Each structure stands twice: as structure tokens, then as C-alpha cells.
Image (cartoon, rainbow, N blue to C red):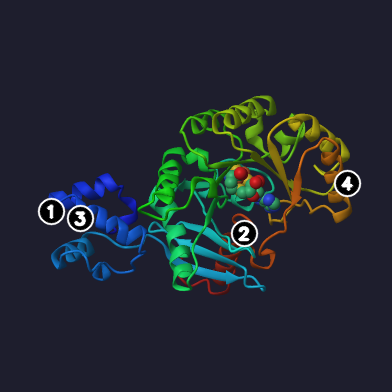
Amino acid sequence: MAVPSIFDLSLDALTATVREWGYPAYRARQVWEWVYQHKAEDFAAMTTLPQALREQLASHFRLSGLTLVAEQRSSDGQTVKRLWQLPDGQMIESVLMAYDDDRRTACLSTQAGCAMGCVFCATGQMGFARHLTAGEIVEQAVQFARVLEAEGERLSNVVLMGMGEPLHNYDATLEAIRRLNDPHGLNIGQRHITLSTVGLVPEILRFADEGLQVGLAISLHAATDEERSRLLPINRRWPLAELLDAVRTYIERTGRRVTFEWALIAGENDTVEQAEALGRLLQGLKCHVNLIPLNPTGGYDGRPSDPERVAIFQAVLRAYRIGSTVRVRRGIDIQAGCGQLKAQVVRGQRRQRKASPSEPRS
Ligand code: SAH
Ligand code: SF4
């Protein structure tokens, strides 16, 4: 079996291991700080630890569970996308986005693939492979934070909007949020973390009761059950009325404004009728709508809406006093849509295999 990654240990498990080896518990806290605070790349660099402990750690654990497969930088240099391979060969993506106000936001994956099957989503088109561990989720952030810190910057925000449905992988996602937030770790404020969900109602309610101040984004994309069920199959299980009730509970419990995401698809969900239905659905709710022109994907023939349609859609929402922002598609030139870089790399590998059929398949 592969040597486990140190990221796959909770602080309790690390403490138990260190004590088993005959060291006091505070040594585990030191290791933890080397991993999450100093982002050490080598056990030998953990200079406050006894030499023997560093050697024991090195013989039992790896300091990384992620292997970089591909990296792309957008032409303006503001967006970096990474494709990682996990020890079992699965591939996931994460993205780092720089903003003019000094924010540095990492977009993390929570699953390899996704089981939710949203028709326009590159990850949904791949199907579900497996849940990520809490360590695999957090390490994506640590990897970006390390690069930023070497440049005198700091990772300030995290969005769980990469591959996968975070609330389908509830426990690992929650543990990852706690580690991201840990003052002895990455120390990212709860208000600077946002979780995006397709709308798993029981888990939204559970999440509302965690006593956290994490931002919630709901992938809405349609304001009638008929239209939403066509785009997001999960709507058949948790239709709009139940979803909106859960969102109201989240707002009540946390006091936080919720964001609704809406990928604008020409002639599909960018109509005045959908805008009116959305206005009625969200009226009076403490919320904001992010309008994102669809990022075209291989498995879906929808197109992004024209700017004129987007403007009309936004004007209708304004009439209902609902704030909205048209989000600039970050890194469109580097396949920075959810799951798109992996889809591109896998297509390339298939082409290569076709070109040299004698090569063994991985
Ligand atoms: N599974 C979660 C989080 C990951 S997807 C969720 O669905 O919310 C992050 C966001 O990207 C979601 O709002 C999703 O609907 C959106 N998205 C996926 N594919 C897209 C595409 N091709 N164009 C625009 N937005 C897309
Ligand atoms: Fe999964 Fe989110 Fe993509 Fe839907 S949009 S398939 S929930 S990753």
C-alpha cells in the first residue's frame, strides 16, 4: 500500500501517533503547524522537532498526497489552474484567482467527478469516481498558499466550487473547512470561505446548524421546477419550494446573505419568463444573484447568452429589487470551468493512445 499522506491525519490521529512513538502530545501540535502554517515541503525542514521524530515521520508519511499533472496560467496571469493526480490515479482540479483588491481565492475540488449529473457541467458529464478526503481538499489550498507566501502574499479566500458536490461529501468537507479556518493552520476566516451546492436539502439544514459563518452559494440556474429538473436532475428529489425553505433556514441561523448562481444559457434559462419567475422566487430574501454566461462544454450543446439578453435579465431582477452581478468568466482561455482541464487532458491522452496503440494503457 502507498505510504499515507500526513494530510490524511486529523490532529487527534497525529497526536495518538506521536504519543505511541513516545513523544509528548505537544509535538503533534508542532508537526501540525509545520504542515499547515509553515507549509513545509520536507520533514527535514521541521527544525523544532527532534531529529529522530523527523526521521520517523519521513518513514511513515508522505508530505503530499497530490502530484501536479498540468498547470495553466491565463493570458493576464491572474488565474492559475492546476490538475492534480491522487495516489489512486484519480485527477482533480483547483484554481487560484488574483483580484485587484489583494484577494487571493482558491477554488477547491471536493470529489473526483460528481454524481449529480447537471447537464451543462463538465464534471457532471464525467460521472462520480470517489469522495476526496479532508486532507486532499485542504492540501489543494496549502499548495497555493505556499506559492503565494513565497511571493510575500497570502491566501485570503477559499471557495468550494471546484469538481464535485461538497455536501454529498459532507464529513470530509466539514473537516476541511475547520482545518482551513484553524488559527494554527491556514487561518482563513469563516466569512472568507464559501461553499457552493447544487441544493441537497437535508445537508443544507445540517450545515445551518454547525454554528459556522461560512458563505453559502446555491446553484439555482432555473426558477421553475420544470426547467430546473431538465438542467439539474437533483431538482426532482429536492424541488424549488423545499430548497428555498432550507435556504431561508440557513439565512435565519447564520445571518448571512446567500448567493444564487445562474449560468445563462441562450434561449434556455435567459428568458424574461425565467427572470420574472426568479424575481418572484427570491423577492424579500437576503440574497444576491451571480449571473455567469455558460462556459460551453463538450457534452452539452448550449451556448452562452448574448450581452443584450444578460442586460434584460438583470433589469428584470432589478425591478424585483434583487441585486445581481454578471461574473466575468475567469480564465476562460485556460479551461477554468469546473472539470474542463481534466476533460481536456484526458481527451489528449486518448488521442495519444490512439496515435501509438502499442503503448500500455495506464
Ligand atoms: N457542485 C457544486 C459546486 C461545484 S460547481 C455546485 O454545483 O454548486 C461550481 C459552479 O459552477 C456551480 O454553480 C455550477 O453550476 C457552475 N457550473 C458548472 N458548469 C458550468 C458551466 N459549463 N458554465 C457555467 N457554470 C457552470
Ligand atoms: Fe456536480 Fe456541481 Fe457539476 Fe452539478 S454543477 S454536476 S453538482 S459539480
Taking the spot 62% from the left edge, 68% from the top edge, the residue there is: 78
Q: Residue at x 35, y 53 (%)?
A: 184
Q: CA distance from mark 3 to mark 2?
A: 42 Å
The residue under label 2 is 340
Residue placed at 42% from the left, 43% from the top? 172
Find disc 4 in the rendering and name its residue.
Answer: 312
Q: Amino acid at mark 1?
A: Trp
Q: Residues within 10 Å of mark 2 (few under 14, many from 20)?
A: many
Label 4: element kind: helix
Alpha-carbon span between mark 1 and mark 4: 66 Å
Q: Position of residue 161 (x, y in %)?
A: 57, 50
Q: Nearer the viewer, mark 3 or mark 4?
A: 3
For residue 27, which numbered disc appears in the image?
3
**For mark 1, what is the residue?**
21
Q: Is residue 121 above or below residue 276?
A: below
Task: Give the quarter the ligand 2 occupies.
Answer: top right
- As measured in the structure, the alpha-carbon distance from the residue carrying label 1 to the one carrying label 2 is 44 Å
- Closer to the N terminus: mark 3 or mark 2? 3
Q: Which mark's residue is nearer the viewer, 1 or 3?
A: 3
For marks 1 and 4 on the same chain, the one whose residue lies earlier in the sequence: 1
Look at the numbered disc 3 and give the secondary structure of its residue.
Answer: helix
